[in-house]
């Protein structure tokens, strides 16, 4: 994968990424580490999709947890209540999520301004209400139990290690897709929208179609993350898909940097792992997340990735060489 | 009890809650006109209004002083928020502005939880709890306070925008930011004023609803969303639209909760929001071209 000049070299980042993921379980061979990393991987999937919406379509989605929950509950209800094959259920989850994203995105993304944020916020909260109220299907506030484990080609994903591999392999695929997408014609078109939407339209970019596409992709990825979550825990509760979850996902993307795929990876991992060590702050999470959001936007609007990229640019200029050595 | 009496009862309670939504919607409208941004912190200002009034009343201040004091303090919080976070930024995109208000919303909620804990508090009703009976329906005296206060605030805000230099300068910024700058209007100051005014109007809503609904640290999300829905239904940026949207939303919600199911009460409002965005994003009172690209 070739990164364009001035951006974080993808090849170096990919190497570091693979190394960390592969060596992680060897360095920390505990169940606890695997569990935290499985959740981190699921959050990375969610953040990658949201990052495309925020950084490339230039829109906020405040109901991303809604698509996440839609995926989880579609998988969970179909398998636990109707005995549908898990992989078929996952396909249904992805399709349903895409359909909802189309239904919202097609009309709302025609509007100038930030109406998607409010429409998705409403959508997310409505879904949360449905998860609570549709007792016969979802089990309501006390939760949905009896979701089967995933199996494929005679393999059962019933241990933490096997699930770790499954989740992070999925992350790898989505990550590669995202990196390619960002450098594709549509990805560059979307960056053009960020610069100046009118100018982008004048040179023949269908900004509306590009934004809808990105929104649908993000919704599908979120639903997949939800399905993975459902089959890992084999139990679902509406709390995991509330408004605050949507907000935390936005914070992951902002902290990592909205214009950077790798930023979202780091942001999601950081904000999954750090709270594990800062349990004392649990009751203060609104205060802490609020302060983080305000401070990042004020003092580091391009997030962690922006800082790292500037560091690379400086080093590159200092070396006065066109290509930076692939190390990090 | 006949269906007619029930209907009247639901409409009355709907109008009462609708007055609250109208005030919150007015707050969204004021900031939107000055900045084109959706101020997510609006719900937190409403919540703070109720909480501060409760705290002042608990400190043995007379009820009227506690209420007015809460509005003044929250207005100050709104101004302080703008001065500390938005004012120092030279070029802030509308998207970043929205994100900062989300941060402010979380921060204020978190701060309220740290200061007052997770308990729910309430204020005594402004004039007794003896229900007033009209044509087989009954309502609390607080309903009159809510509708009366809403009417007074709406008229005052209207007078402010029409007849004061500051209000007219704020309208100039809303109409054309660049032209306003050329005419010597200090745009940054007007943005600060809009946040202060929106916070104040939001706090009024929080104070007058406190006697009938509890004040609690996390009440801002839903109230803010309902207010935003009202603003969209009426037409984002339109003052009269905020009032129409608020009252309409209140009544629809009360009817829905009464005749369908109270568990889905919030879902009805949010569904209305989405349908409005899909079908008529400019709202009932907005201009037809608004919002479309």
Image (cartoon, rainbow, N blue to C red):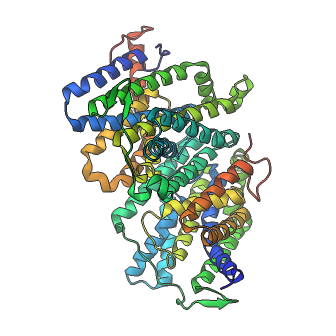
Where, by quadrant of the figure, is residue B242 drawn? Answer: bottom right
Residue A163 visible in this rendered orientation of the protein: yes
In the rendered view, does A77 fall on the left or right side of A21? right
Q: Residue at x 41, y 24 (%)?
A: A172
Closer to us: A296 or A100: A100
In the rendered view, does A27 fall on the left or right side of A261? left
Numbered marks: total: 0
x and y percent of residue A300 in the render? 43, 37
Closer to us: A185 or A174: A174
Q: Residue at x 50, y 79 (%)?
A: B211
Q: Residue at x 43, y 48 (%)?
A: A245
In the rendered view, does B54 fall on the left or right side of B194? left
Q: Residue at x 30, y 25 (%)?
A: A21
**Quadrant of the image containing the N terminus of chain B:** bottom right
x and y percent of residue B18 in the render? 64, 70
x and y percent of residue A83 in the render? 45, 41
Q: Say above or below: B23 vs A228.
A: below
Closer to us: B47 or A70: A70
x and y percent of residue B65 in the render? 48, 81
Residue A300 visible in this rendered orientation of the protein: no
**Quadrant of the image containing the C terminus of chain B:** top right
Furthest residue in direction front, as rendered: A83
Q: Say above or below: B13 vs B106.
A: below
């Amino acid at each position: 994968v070739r990164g364009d000049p001035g951006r974080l070299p993808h090849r170096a980042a990919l190497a570091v990424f693979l190394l960390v993921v592969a060596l992680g379980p060897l360095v920390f061979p505990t169940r606890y580490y695997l569990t935290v990393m499985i959740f981190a991987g699921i959050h990375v999937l969610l953040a990658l999709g949201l990052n495309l919406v925020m950084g490339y379509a230039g829109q906020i989605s405040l109901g991303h947890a809604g698509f996440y929950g839609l995926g989880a509950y579609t998988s969970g209800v179909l398998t636990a209540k109707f005995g549908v094959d898990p992989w078929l259920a996952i396909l249904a989850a992805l399709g349903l999520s895409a359909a909802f994203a189309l239904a919202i995105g097609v009309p709302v993304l025609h509007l100038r301004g930030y109406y998607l944020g409010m429409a998705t916020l409403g959508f997310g909260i409505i879904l949360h209400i449905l998860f609570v109220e549709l007792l016969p299907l979802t089990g309501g506030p006390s939760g949905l139990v009896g979701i089967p484990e995933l199996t494929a080609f005679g393999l059962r994903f019933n241990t933490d290690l096997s699930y770790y591999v499954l989740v992070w392999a999925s992350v790898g695929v989505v990550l590669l897709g995202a990196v390619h997408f960002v450098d594709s014609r549509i990805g560059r078109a979307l960056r053009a929208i960020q610069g100046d939407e009118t100018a982008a339209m004048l040179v023949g970019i269908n900004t509306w179609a590009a934004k809808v596409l990105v929104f649908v992709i993000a919704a599908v990825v979120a639903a997949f993350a939800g399905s993975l979550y459902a089959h890992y825990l084999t139990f679902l509760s509406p709390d995991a898909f509330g408004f605050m979850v949507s907000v935390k996902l936005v914070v992951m993307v902002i902290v990592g940097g909205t214009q950077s795929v790798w930023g979202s990876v780091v942001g999601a991992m950081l904000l999954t792992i750090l709270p594990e060590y800062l349990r004392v702050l649990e009751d203060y999470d609104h205060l802490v997340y609020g302060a983080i959001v305000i401070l990042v936007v004020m003092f580091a609007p391009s997030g962690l990735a922006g800082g790292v990229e500037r560091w690379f640019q400086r080093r590159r200029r200092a070396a006065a060489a066109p290509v930076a050595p692939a190390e990090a | 009890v006949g269906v007619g009496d029930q209907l009247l009862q639901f409409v009355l309670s709907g109008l009462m809650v609708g007055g609250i939504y109208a005030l919150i919607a007015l707050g969204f409208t004021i900031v939107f006109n000055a900045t084109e941004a959706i101020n997510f912190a609006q719900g937190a200002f409403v919540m703070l209004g109720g909480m501060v009034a409760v705290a002042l009343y608990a400190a043995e201040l007379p009820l009227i002083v506690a209420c007015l004091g809460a509005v003044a303090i929250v207005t100050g919080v709104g101004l302080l928020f703008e001065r500390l976070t938005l004012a120092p930024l030279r070029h802030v995109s509308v998207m970043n502005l929205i994100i900062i208000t989300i941060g402010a919303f979380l921060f204020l909620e978190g701060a309220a939880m740290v200061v007052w804990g997770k308990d729910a508090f309430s204020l005594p009703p402004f004039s007794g709890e003896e229900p007033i009976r009209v044509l087989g329906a009954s309502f609390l005296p607080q309903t009159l306070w809510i509708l009366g206060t809403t009417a007074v605030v709406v008229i005052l805000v209207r007078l402010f925008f029409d007849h004061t230099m500051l209000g007219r300068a704020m309208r100039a910024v809303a109409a054309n930011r660049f032209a306003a700058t050329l005419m010597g209007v200090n745009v940054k100051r007007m943005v600060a004023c809009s946040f202060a005014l929106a916070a104040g109007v939001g706090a009024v809503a929080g104070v007058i609803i406190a006697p009938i609904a509890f004040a609690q640290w996390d009440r801002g999300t839903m109230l803010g969303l309902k207010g935003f829905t009202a603003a969209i239904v009426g037409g984002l940026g339109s003052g009269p639209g905020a009032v129409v949207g608020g009252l309409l939303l209140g009544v629809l919600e009360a009817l829905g909760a009464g005749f369908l199911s109270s568990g889905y009460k919030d879902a009805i409002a949010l569904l209305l929001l989405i349908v409005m965005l899909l079908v008529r994003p400019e709202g009932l009172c907005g201009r037809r071209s608004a919002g479309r690209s």
